[in-house]
Image (tube, rainbow, N blue to C red):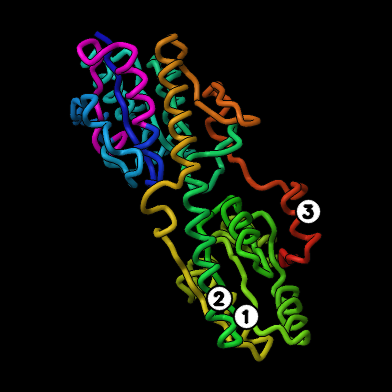
Amino acid sequence: MKKIGMLTSGGDCQGLNATMRGVAKYLFEYYGDSELKVYGFKDGYKGLISNEYDVLTSRDFSGILNLGGTILGTSRVPFKELKNEEGMPRVKQMKETYNLLGLDCLVILGGNGTHKTANLLSEEGLNVVTLPKTIDNDIWGTDMTFGFHSALDVATDVIDRLHSTATSHSRIFIVEVMGHKAGWLNLYAGMAGGVEVILLPEIPYDIDKVVDVLEKRRQQRKRFSILAVAEGVISKEEAKMSKKEFKQARENMRYSNISYRIADEITERADLEVRVTIPGHVQRGGAPCAYDRVLATRFGAKAAELIINKKYGYMVGLKNNKVVPVPLNEVAGKLKTVPLDCDLIKEARNIGISFGD
């Protein structure tokens, strides 16, 4: 009897169920229903810690290809909370659950923090295979994560819908797109939505440069402008601060979101009417797009292949459109941010898009 544990950890996104389905369908096809037992741990690592799970059959993975969210539930268990003065009690509990159930492998779907914990479990002797989940596309070792394209479709649709109202009222619109440390989603959405300004966490912005772009468009008698702003953007002044100074400055900021501050900064410098739209968690809700359904299925099938061949300690990734295993210890703790010299930024600049620098 082959015994597989499965969990989803961190923030949810489109494609989690589709990916688990890909893993399960391949394994059930290979081993048969009577020779495979799948333990679905509830609410991510919390379920593994507390030994809370459901035994899943092939039927549980039927009809979930286009279902958003995760049938297992999810939660955040920060990596820094796994260790204390007494050692790693939570890791010990996870290992105990793994050994108590006699698992052959643990399949983990998650983002950066999830992969750090998964690598720790792998180093502790557990057989682990992981899958890269995040709308931010910021996991090192893979060209693309599942969830990214679905969120991109949502963010682009928001920008598209604002074009008509922005034109009608001759307004400036700021759309705040998710992305704390990496601006991939905002970069793609801004280009797909045809915005005038894209502000990324990787490029500190100069508000005067942003206003110059908007003023130039007004002088050209263009009725509106749209800015795509990543939630993690910082100004050039903030970029010079120490971590402590920056943290304190943000804590004292009177705005709930950075986009509202930027809107006020624009209004103070120019006679322009600015509106802010924040789609928020809508970006990672709902059904996965066709691209993500295909990618998730490919990822899931490759993970199952690794399990069958007893190749553990790997993340499944996409490189040059090929699904490949990536050593987990090369992935954990690394963040894939937008390179300042990447082709997308160069091409965006070439067509006149400003990055506020």
Q: Where, by quadrant of the figure, is residue 225 drawn?
A: bottom right
- Residue that sits furthest to the right in the current view: 350
Residue 317 image offset from top left, x and y in percent: 54, 29
Residue type, label 1? Glu
- Mark 3 or mark 2, which has the lower sequence index? 2
**Residue 2 in view, yes or no:** yes
Q: Who's the residue at 48% across and 40% down the image?
A: 146
Residue type, label 2? Arg
In this figure, which residue is indicated by the disc labeled 3? 346
Residue 136 image offset from top left, x and y in percent: 53, 48
Image height of 17 relative to 128, above or below: below
Q: Where, by quadrant of the figure, is residue 222 drawn?
A: bottom right
Q: Which mark is residue 261?
A: 2
312 and 24: which is toward the camera = 24
Residue type, label 3? Lys
Residue 257 image offset from top left, x and y in percent: 49, 69
Mark 3 Cα shell of 10 Å, populated few (<14), some (14-19), many (≥20): few
Q: In the image, which residues are magenta? A: 20-45
Magenta part, dominant SS = helix
Which mark is in front, 3 or 2? Answer: 3
Inspect the magenta stretch and tell me whether residue 83 lies in it. no
For the residues labelled 1 and 2, the Cα–Cα distance comes to 6 Å
